[in-house]
Image (tube, rainbow, N blue to C red):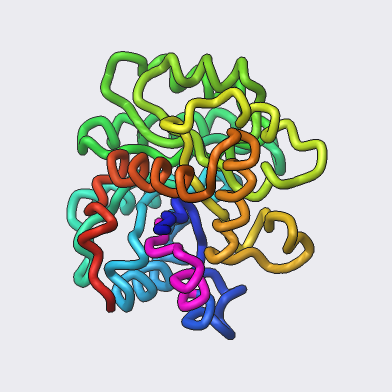
Amino acid sequence: MQIVDTHCHLYEPEFDADREEALARAVDAGVGRMLCPAIDSQSHGRLFDLCRRHPRRCIPMMGLHPTSVNDNPRWRKELELVEQLLRTPPDGIARFCAAGEIGLDFYWSADFRDEQTEAFRRQCRLAVDLDLPIAVHTRNAWPEMTAVIEAFRGTGLRGVFHAFSEDAATYRRLKACGDFLFGIGGVVTFKNSRAAETVREMDLDDILLETDCPYLTPAPRRGQRNEPAYTQFVCAKIAELQGTTPATVAAATTANAERMFGLCPSQTEHHE
C-alpha cells in the first residue's frame, strides 16, 4: 500500500533532531512520497536542502504563505522571488509540483486582508500562466477565499484545498469551481469532527491525504508532534467513514495526487 502525504513540513526545525528517522518511519508506513509546501524565503534553504537530499521522496512546492504577508513591507519582493523560482527552479530542484502554500488567513490578524487578497490573486494568476495546481491555505477566511476561487472559474485554475474541514455545502460549492481536490488531515480523526461528517458525503476521487506535520496530529497520536508516517491514521479513518478499506483509499488518493501534481505513478518509483 503506497500513500502520498500531500502537505508536510518535514523541513521545519521541529524535525532537526530526527528528520532522517522520521523519513524512514514514513517509508516503513507506506508513505513513499511527501509534498512539501513553501512558506517564505526564510525557510527556502531548509526546504531545498531536504528535497535535494531526497528528490524522489520529497517534492517541493513554491509560494508565499498568507501570514508571511502580514506586517511585512517586503511581501511584494517575496512574490517576485516566488515567480522567479517557479519559472526557473534553483540548482538541484527539478521542478515545483504546485504553487503553494498560498491563500488567506485572518486568524491572527484581519488588518492585512487587502494585502493577502492581492498576494493570493497574483499567485493564482501565476499558477494559471504556468499550468500549475495551487495548494490553498484558509483560516477564518472561507467566504473570502471562496469568492477569489469563484472569480477564477473558467480560467483553468486547479488545485487542492489544504486542511479541508468545512461542511458538505462548502465542499459542493468549491467542487463546482473546477478541478479541485480536498486535502484531509488529522482533524478528521478528532472526536465530533465536522470533517468526519463531510468526508462521509465526499467522492473518494476528490480526496487527498495529508498531515500538515508537525501540526494537526491525528488520533491516536494527538498531543505528540505530527509526522508523515501518521498519514496512515488519516487513511484508515477515511476508509472507516466511507465504508471501504484503507487499501482502496490509499490507491484512490495516490492516483488523485499523481494526476493533480504530475507525479510519476507509484509502481515506477525507485528506492533511494
- In the picture, which quadrant includes the N terminus? bottom left
Q: Is residue 214 visible?
A: yes
Question: Where's residue 175, x and y in %?
Answer: 46, 20
Is 147 rendered above or below residue 196?
A: above
- In the picture, which quadrant includes the C terminus? bottom left
The quarter holding residue 243 reads: top right
Queried whether the magenta region covers residue 33, the answer comes back as: yes
Question: Where's residue 9, x and y in %?
Answer: 51, 62
135 and 269: which is toward the camera: 269
Q: Which residue is at the far bottom?
A: 17
263 and 150: which is toward the camera: 263
121 vs 170, left or right, is: left
258 vs 177, left or right, is: left
Q: Is residue 74 visible?
A: no
Residue sitting at x 41%, y 15%: 151
Residue sitting at x 69%, y 55%: 218
Is 146 rendered above or below residue 246?
A: above
Queried whether the magenta region covers residue 63, the answer comes back as: no
87 vs 193, left or right, is: left
48 vs 116, left or right, is: left
**Chain part drawn in magenta:** 23-35
Residue sitting at x 29%, y 74%: 52
Question: Where's residue 25, x and y in %?
Answer: 52, 75
Question: Where's residue 22, x and y in %?
Answer: 53, 76
Residue sitting at x 81%, y 36%: 192
